[in-house]
Amino acid sequence: MNYWVLALTFLSVNLDFFFMLIFLLKKYQVVKVMIGYLLGNMILLILSYIVGKALLVFLPEWLLGVLGLLPIYLAFHDDDDEDGDKHHRSQILSVTLTYLSVCAGCNLSIFLPVLVGESLTHFLMTLVFIGALTILVVFVIKLIADVPVITSIMEKYGEKLMKVCYILIGLWVFWDSGLISHIIAFF
């Protein structure tokens, strides 16, 4: 398990949601935002892992390296997600549903190829690691939410940075799955 790849994956798929976090943290209690965001992340990670394991039953891991095309595709595909806040009685449910509506497609597409070859033990460690990053991000976003320079940089470069991260993740999946070595051996 490569923690740098996991951190890069987490940051890149959540970069666009960091803006939503700013608004959600201004509207809801920090603890409620943290729990809702954590719940959304865990749901999508578990789904990615289960789908990946189901695919491994039918296909060898090196062939699943082709899934690295998903993050690369997303880097070049304009995604016009609705960033609208969903209103619910529960702040936790509101944050969770907002996160799932904004990030489900990207998270599943990006984390599935990254998690496909992980053992259950490594996956559980991944859940703890991503959970810790989720909590850390909420605190950091809360601290910097009102800093104009940070907001300006994120608005100006955030999408480009996210796309570069997606491409790097896709290339990592090609390499880590063994797809590249199989292609080189073929020639």
Image: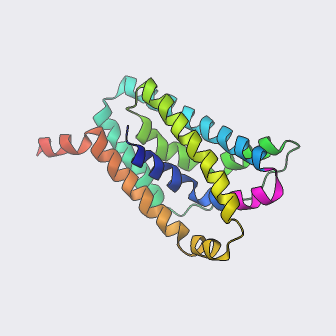
Q: Nearer the viewer, residue 129 or 173?
A: 129
Q: Is residue 34 left or right of residue 80?
A: right
Q: Position of residue 96 (x, y in %)?
A: 72, 43
Magenta span of residues: 21-29
Q: Position of residue 4 (x, y in %)?
A: 40, 48
Residue found at x 37% / y 56%: 168
Indicate whether 139 appears above or below 53.
Answer: below
Q: Is residue 81 visible?
A: no
Q: Is residue 62 left or right of residue 127?
A: left
Q: Position of residue 82 (x, y in %)?
A: 69, 58
Image quadrant in which you'd find residue 38: top right
Q: Is residue 130 visible?
A: yes
Q: Quadrant of the N terminus?
A: top left
Residue found at x 33% / y 52%: 171
Color scheme of the displayed model: rainbow
User: Does residue 16 belong to the magenta stretch?
Assistant: no
Q: Nearer the viewer, residue 69 or 155?
A: 155
User: Does residue 23 belong to the magenta stretch?
Assistant: yes
Residue found at x 48% / y 32%: 125
Indicate whether 147 appears above or below 174.
Answer: below
Q: Position of residue 174 (x, y in %)?
A: 30, 46
Q: Is residue 151 left or right of residue 160?
A: right
Count of picture labels: 0
Magenta stretch: dominant secondary structure: helix
Residue found at x 61% / y 36%: 42
Q: Nearer the viewer, residue 15 or 31?
A: 31
